[in-house]
Image: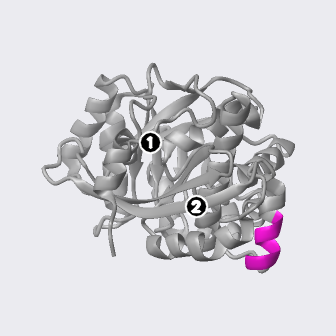
Amino acid sequence: MKIKSLKAGVHRFSVPVPLLAKPFNRRIVSCEVETDDGYVGFGMTGGAFLPFAVVTALEKELLPVVKGMDPRDTEAIHEKIWWELNQRSMTGVISSALSCIDIACWDIHGKLVGRSVAQLLGGARDWAPTYCTFGFHEYDREQLVEAAKLQVKNGHRRLKMVVGVDKKGWQEDAARVRLVREAIGPDIELMMDANYKFNPVEARLLCRAIEDCNMFWFEEPLYQNDTRALADLRRHTGIPIAAGQNEGHRWRLRQLIEHQAVDIVQPNCCYNGGYTETLKVAHMAQAFNMPIANGGGWPLFNMHTMAGLMNGWRVEFHLDMQAVGEQVFINPPRPENNIVKIPAGPGLGLTPNKDALRDGLIRE
């Protein structure tokens, strides 16, 4: 079994968002790897950051390096890409492109042996707990509260909202968090995600203002995941700190662990080099008795990590990314009773919707 060819493309999907009249537009990069004996694996990364550069990297740079290799030899594939394209441990485009290829290779491996990726990763469970990212910054206060109530009505017991982008600053975030907590009651898990947007002083002030709101975690609160400042913030708040979703390799995630900067490590297989790199991060976190959780969305891929590994934890069903998955794949799994079941089929257990991918393809 040898890698024969690779096809990649950028796709745009329009997805509805509860309570908002205007849909969100989301881009993805898809990747299909085909072997000489007819197996096809599907990989994907997000399309928010330089998606056309990722496609070019896949087709013009990575394919010539991995062509002719066995897709099951993921360590060999990573090592060869490392020495020929990535010696300086770059992130961004190269990590996203490597994620695409790696996910597709694990999909092929699973199809060949009749096992899910979760089983290949270790098979800890055939399910993973879920949470719902519902609280978009486009909502005003009233819409935010109604959106939270709607998702509780839909059965979600774990909710996450965005902070750090309101023009009124951290004070408005504190007010919005408090309104949501009052609306959903004390028993629903509530998380917040700043997506790198705060400086250390603002983050500490926000934490201090909502200490009594029983926040489940504060995700990526600080610029650039500054490990020194994250560790300091963690020492000054009782709110658990989570980070790591866009870090492109294990060394950056190791820094978060070694500096005691986080309580929860968040490797995302769609950005950090795929399942091969995520597996290393998960085992490293195990050695420090730490859970891993999915941040950065794309649950249909990350659910395999969270189910397959002993310290795998929450899978993020980000509402707009979930809606993209509903278009990209035919009848994908959905959260039910706050868990997601891993599909019974081999590999990813997902069937790409060829028509939707073709219709959403962006042609330069």
**Residue picked out by circle 1:** 352
Is residue 91 something that shows in the picture? no
Quarter of the image with the C terminus is bottom left
Residue closest to the far left: 21
Task: Report the side of 312 relative to 169 (left or right).
Answer: right
| Kind of residue at disc 1 | Pro
Q: Is residue 290 above or below residue 251?
A: above
What secondary structure is the stretch in magenta mostly built from? helix
Q: Which mark is residue 6?
A: 2
Number of dots carrying numbers: 2
Residue 329: x %, y % from top left: 41, 39
- Is the Cβ of the residue at disc 2 closer than 8 Å to that at disc 1? no
Task: Report the side of 140 relative to 100 (left or right).
Answer: left
Highlighted range, magenta: 79-85
Q: Report the residue at 58% width, 22% height from top.
A: 344
Is residue 123 something that shows in the picture? yes
Q: Report the residue at 67% width, 54% height from top.
A: 102
Q: Secondary structure at mark 1?
A: loop
Residue 69: x %, y % from top left: 78, 59
Q: Is residue 75 above or below residue 348?
A: below
Q: Report the residue at 47% width, 54% height from top.
A: 193
Q: Report the residue at 78% width, 53% height from top.
A: 70
190 or 32: which is nearer to us?
Answer: 32
Residue closest to the far front: 37
Q: CA distance from mark 2 to mark 1?
A: 16 Å
| Kind of residue at disc 2 | Leu
Residue 7: x %, y % from top left: 52, 61
Residue 358 magenta-highlighted: no
Q: Is residue 128 above or below residue 206?
A: above
93 or 358: which is nearer to us?
Answer: 358
